[in-house]
Amino acid sequence: MAEPYGSPLAASLRDDVLERFLRYVRIDTQSARGSEATPSTAGQLELARLLAEELRGLGLEQVELSREGYVYATLPASGAVAGPTVGLLAHLDTSPDAAGRGVSPRVWPDYDGGELVLPGDPEQVLSPATSGLLAERTGHDIVTSDGTTLLGADDKAGVAEIMAAVAHLVSHPELPRQRTRIGFTVDEEVGRGADHFELDRFGADFAYTLDGQVVGETENETFSAVELGVTFHGIGVHPGTAKGKLVNPLRLAAAFIESLPRDLAPETTEGREGFVHPYAIEGGADRALVTVILRDFDEDALAAHESLVRARAEAAVANEPRASVTFTRWEQYRNMRMALERVPHVVDAALEATRRVGLEPRLGSIRGGTDGSRLTEMGLPTPNLFTGGNEYHSVREWISVQDMAISAAMIVELLRRWAEPGVEPHAASESGAPPRDGAGRR
């Protein structure tokens, strides 16, 4: 059986993390946009109850399931270890962007480097030619769905890795560890993961989300994000008698969308470039709503994107005095980097834990956001750690078993690192990686 990383700790965690992951992904936890319930779907509560039961079975303390579906638990420190309380977080929901009911995971052992034709839909093919990291996973055991649903590695890989690491530490009481609070959140994929999360109840000094992708990467920067609702108001008239009377809001909306710069679209931007993305439109005879999401790493650039959108919308109605446009604004999350730079030891510990499992650590930026974006803004510094998942939010989502195992091993080493006396910050000098496509919060 391939163990490409040569980490004995990862090898010992492999079977447990895989077994947990395969169980968790079979529970339908897709969140739902537009729902006013919390959590937005019942399946999230089903998984939350299961995890709370498993945490109690492991002997964790203060295991709670909140009425909103959050799970809280405490892994006590070993012995007389003193120091900060560390938080570990992952989200229970999966994306509503692809089918998620009836997930049937498939394990492809000892991947040979070729194409993987997903059995439920032969048109869905995983190929090293289109998925670059897959080419680097020869000899790994690859997990996919059957091609008709997403897999759910975002973020059940993070859930399984935390659970496997906690189970390992419980079964090895001789290993030093810091007091750790476990938290599982709901509705992250629809931008509401931190809405009802109680920081005082959680009680951590800082935390880590397990919601990243590339193995070895600690993400200390995210987009800042704003959503604008742009509503065009027209005049609805029966089309048979509409001459000189009808003001079609859909035409106004179409003119507005067409006026947006193509070089600011997500399909034409990469790296540290922000974007303006009209991603949904709805309406009828008298009104049309265009939902636009704005993203950038730089706050001034984000403000410029918003000014641009407002100006183009006003221009779309400027020649029709009977039409108007109104706006609604949702500030979704902010770039976590500046806040994390004030507590460099939090990121440094993750880099050191990554070294200790035999990987070369690197810093990364996310072209998206996580629960940690909001939590950091709320006062809980929360960088994002790798899980190994790939092609999130699609039926071609996949993950390597060995990558899950090395992530779980890194969690173990992270908690051991924080238990060491006199932990000194390690200079965060690793060169930053290009920003990754965003998973999680849109």
Image (tube, rainbow, N blue to C red):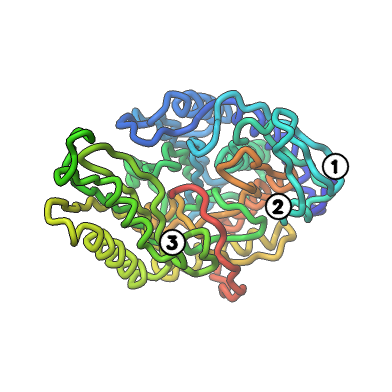
Residue at (37% x, 62% y) in the render: 260
Look at the image and tell me whether residue 56 can be seen: no
Viewer-side label of 1, 2: 2
Q: Nearer the viewer, residue 200 or 131?
A: 131
- Quote the CA–CA distance across marks 2 and 3: 24 Å
In the shown orientation, is residue 234 left or right of residue 290?
left
Q: Nearer the viewer, residue 166 or 111?
A: 111
Q: Position of residue 344 (x, y in %)?
A: 48, 69
- 374 versus 116 height, above or below: below
Q: Considering the numbered disc 1 on the image, is that residue within a helix, a strand or a loop?
A: loop
Residue at (35% x, 44% y) in the render: 281
Residue at (46% x, 51% y) in the render: 370
User: Which residue, given by chain and number where applicable, does mark 3 sit on?
Assistant: 223
User: Which residue, given by chain and number where applicable, does mark 1 sit on?
Assistant: 110
Q: Considering the numbered disc 2 on the image, is that residue within a helix, a strand or a loop?
A: loop
In the shown orientation, is residue 177 left or right of residue 69?
right
User: Which residue, given by chain and number where applicable, does mark 2 sit on?
Assistant: 131
Q: Which quadrant would residue 420 be assigned to in this image? A: bottom right
Total marks drawn? Answer: 3
Q: Position of residue 251 (x, y in %)?
A: 30, 49
Q: Are circles 2 and 3 on residues that touch, CB within 8 Å?
A: no
